[in-house]
Image (cartoon, coloured by chain):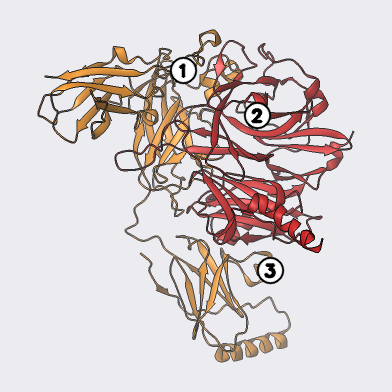
Amino acid sequence: MAREIIAPIRFILLVSKVKNPILFVLIIFFTVLEIYSQTSPEFTFNKEYITVKKDVKTSGNLYIYRGEISKDELSNVNPVLGKLIEEKTSLRFTPLIPFGWNQKYTLVYGDTVEYFSLDIPEEYKYLSVTSIYPSAKTLPSNLLKWYIHFSHPINETHIYDYIRFVNATGDTLPRAALSLENALISDHGKLLTVWIEPGRQKRDLIPNRQLGPVFKNENAYKLVVLKKLKDKNGISMQDNFTHSFQITNDDRVKLDVNLWKIQSPKVNSKSHVLISCHESLDYGSTQNSVIVVNVKGEKIDGNWQLINHESTLSFTPLYPWKKGSYNVLFDNHIEDLAGNNLDRLFDSEITDTISHHLPKTHKIKFSIK
Amino acid sequence: MILSFLENPILANSSLKADFKTGDPGITSINSMTFGPEGILFIGDSKSAQIVAIDLSTHPKVDNSAVKIDFLDKLIADMLGSAIDQIQITDMVVNPENNNIYLSVHHSSGNVILFRVEHNTLKKVSLDNISHTKTSLIDPVNKEAKDKRGRKLRKWAVADIKYTSGKVLLSGLSNKEFASTFRSVDFPFTDKQDYGSLEIYHAAHGQYETHAPIKAFIPTKIKGSSHIIAGYTCTPLVIFPMNNIKPGEHNKGRTVAELGSGNSPVDMVEIKNGGQRYLLIANNNRPLMKMEFTDLESYNGSLTTPVVKKGAAEGVSYVNLPYVNVQQLDKFGGTGFLIVQRESSGNLTLKKGNSWWLEK
């Protein structure tokens, strides 16, 4: 991964505008003397460290600065933090944060000033969006969340600045997403959760009254991830990511597992259990929230998948099915795309609040003969 | 007599720091920080799902009487050798015992750095060999859910953290539900953690219930008894009596102010000056606000009618101070305050606020 580069030996001549010709000759004379007396600072560097051949005549320390800094400006800039280790014939500087690709640096060793940077490797795998949820092309106007899955861990700093919602005329919607200071990122830095401004999606809150809901019925929009978004190495995506979708009526109906259709599997097979939910479920809240148990209440091992634009739950068992009765148990926090879960509406009347009721058990029974 | 004199400070020290060990607490993010007593800094670390308490009492007092750092973001970027868009200042705190200033910074690489301000520049505080104690933030709803490849999918981002009489309080938001999970953890840490959710009747309507997350809060006294003042996204300011907050229950508060739509509180502090108590609120889309506790205490109502004027504020009155784009705020030197502010010129500056604004 780390490529070592031998830097060409260069000397920085700082010849200012000298009007006096005698002084000019003197400067040239001493500069030439200095050139011949100076040991050239050979240095090698990679992402993790830089080593410089020790010069016995140089008493000064080794400093690295961000950017190409001229000698005159050095006193105004703070050097890069890192560890300097003196070895027998060389000095090794390890920066606190590994050197960045395409980032210019200045090396200062005694009187010598050198510039270096690391090129992005040719084989570098650039950041891209691999999947997005909800994946359906038509979505309710009171849609609450998006999940964007990236190929690599992303730069989390100010991440929401790079997510845009654009209407059909190409205008960016103001205040569409909740701009959180601490980004909601999981799955080792690759899955970003984006909340659509809940104050606008929830009826009668001030932002909703003043600005209306973020998305309007029967309108087309695009979610854009700007290519300026960087990965954790500081390298941007190569292109904008664009995902188009259409808005339809709002969804103000609580999820009800009794309306879902289940397709039972065959005995002695590893066939799927398919549960058709008639609408797309929220990706995040559905993960790890459904289990199959037998009559003894033992969990059946297997894998769950959300298919058909997240509207069908599919379970594949690890071992063939046996005869008997089974229950599919659902976590009451499973939501639809508008934040309505199995127990309550996202946007419910206070008189109708369920907070005081005991949570119900949500299950579907099936049997294998 | 001599013996007891010698013993006392050791005993006093050991009560809170008895469990502290020197080593690497494995901090992978600093979302929010707050100082407790005896120079203990509490860190809310969402990525490692933990609260870490580190002992900074050994740091010598720095003279910050003339503190001012211009181009703070450039300074940090220079010191980390990275572009400015790869760094984020996640919090700023002042140790009330010596006015030492600390900044937490996240870098795109996943590195997290704690800096101490020293003579208007920054010094890195080593976090890999430090006297500390810690506790896990356990998922209050499910046991840490993992998908079939063993990846943790639930994410709980700490929004704010505060310490009050033996308890660390945290607010946060998860990527699963839009709810104001609020946690209370005993300190010194035990296995016990209380979860509750703080719900509000939104001032705007009185007809719908909301489950908004708390963005910033402070523990305080209202009319002599312990309360939480919480600022929510889209800015209702709500007070909850502490002894009413029951674990595992939805706790309903009283909305005392609406701080304008399109706005979100960033930080909140209480400052005493000249016998008066003031509440300062930094916002992402409004100037720094000042509210007097006497107004807060005398307001007995709860906002239940819709706010009619666009962007108008309702309830307890407040004054906008001439500080816009304040990104970080903390108390400084007893009666003053310290801010990180993006000035209109674009300069991100760390500076003292003028305490003239906190005088009668």
Q: Determine the chain carrying the residue at label 3.
A: A
Q: Can residue A266 be seen in this view?
A: yes
Residue that numbered label 3 is attached to: A75
Is label 2 in contact with label 1 (beta carbons under 8 Å)?
no
Mark with earlier residue (3, 1): 3
Q: Do labels 2 and 3 share a chain?
A: no
The residue indicated by pointer 1 is: A216
Number of numbered labels in the structure image: 3
Image marks 3 and 1: residues in contact by CB distance under 8 Å: no
* Image mark for residue B231: 2
Question: How far apart in space, not on screen, are marks 2 and 1 (Cα)?
Answer: 29 Å
- Which amino acid, by three-letter code, is at mark 3? Ser
Chain in orange on the image? A
Label 1's element? Answer: loop
User: What crowding class fits label 3: few (fewer than 14 Cα within 10 Å), some (14-19), or many (20 or more)?
Assistant: few
Three-letter code, disc 2 = Gly
Look at the numbered disc 3 and give the secondary structure of its residue. Answer: helix
Tell me residue A290's x, y (percent): 31, 27
Q: Which of marks 2 and 3 is in front?
A: 2
Q: Mark 2 lies on which chain?
A: B
